[in-house]
Amino acid sequence: MILIAERINGMFKDVKQAIADKDKKVIQDLAKRQTQAGASYLDVNVGTAAADQQATMQWLVETIQQTCATPLCLDSQKPDVIAAGLKVANTENGIILNSTPLNKKTDDKILDRYIDMANQAGPKAGIIALTMDKNGVPQDIDTRVAIAAEIVSKAADMGFDPQRLFIDPIILPVKVPDAQAQPTNILAAMDQIKLLADPAPHMTVGLSNISQGATERSLINRIFLAMAVSHGLDSAIVDVLDEELMNVVATSEMLMNKQIYSDSFLKAYKGT
Ligand code: THG
């Protein structure tokens, strides 16, 4: 599974404080621990508090790169913030640009911009595209699939390999009133999205969204991850420092016959 580690995000108090204090140690420590825990990419999100988001993105990227070579997943819905990060990011080992909707009221061509930036960032650069358009986040299955189809078709028109494309059907917190049908809608949408191209685009989610504000967060995250893997999820933005969650990742992949069973399958997965 392509695991994107979620913790370097200004949404977390310690990271927000570290950004305000220019305290590199907090960021570098998270970068190292998440890499050690098995992250394929490190998500980098400046949060909403940073005064200058472009400069903060550059500071985070440079700070992380001083301590580890794990590929980065630049996380902003503002193309200028992504572009600023790309100016200083090492992209040889890969990079993901996270994330763009299909289009926005204020920017009809936002997906094109992310694809252009990824193309300029080299052959390994990917993008995460949200099943979201100028009308916002759809709640139903069909609109999610229709938007995903437009994203896949636009990527194909622009010569962008579907294997560099990650579709995110957008998880909302299950606790939000009237949102309890969303997890099953997302699974049903994923069943169709994986058929949109051959080879299929990757599918990813911001897993921790689902349990925001809820009790039993880790349990909710773990169970939904296992359910989604059985519907074709092959990537996720997660808390890789949650060991129980990482065991669920390894076990789901083994039960899906993507990793070989051995008596030491948990240990073996950690070595991959
Ligand atoms: N899709 C894509 N990218 C994303 C998301 C997504 N990036 C951001 C986010 N969603 C995924 N990352 C997180 C990171 C943290 C939390 C949820 C998702 C989280 N934070 C605690 C909270 O809000 O309760 C912070 C608490 C603290 O300060 O300790 O849950 O969906 N493509």
Image (cartoon, rainbow, N blue to C red):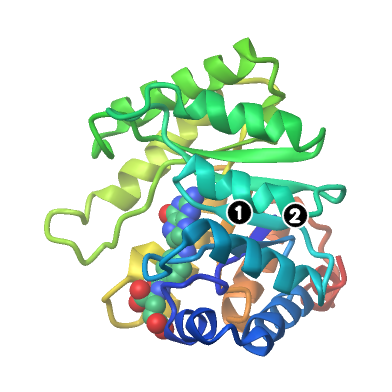
Taking the spot 73% from the left edge, 67% from the top edge, the residue there is 62
Residue 66 shows up from this direction: yes
Residue 37: x and y in percent read: 73, 78
Which residue position is annotated with label 1?
74
Taking the spot 31% from the left edge, 32% from the top edge, the residue there is 141
Which residue position is annotated with label 2?
89
| Up-down relation of residue 88 to residue 270 (above or below) | above
- Kindly state the secondary structure of the residue where label 1 is placed: strand
Residue 58: x and y in percent read: 64, 61
Residue 188: x and y in percent read: 39, 37
Q: What amino acid type is highlighted by mark number 2?
A: Ala
| Up-down relation of residue 151 to residue 240 (above or below) | above
- Kindly state the secondary structure of the residue where label 2 is placed: loop
Q: Is residue 57 left or right of residue 159?
A: left
Q: Is residue 105 left or right of residue 120?
A: left
Taking the spot 41% from the left edge, 44% from the top edge, the residue there is 187
Q: Nearer the viewer, residue 74 or 256?
A: 74
Q: Is residue 6 left or right of residue 78?
A: right
Task: List the single residue furthest toward the top.
Answer: 157
Q: What amino acid type is highlighted by mark number 1?
A: Leu
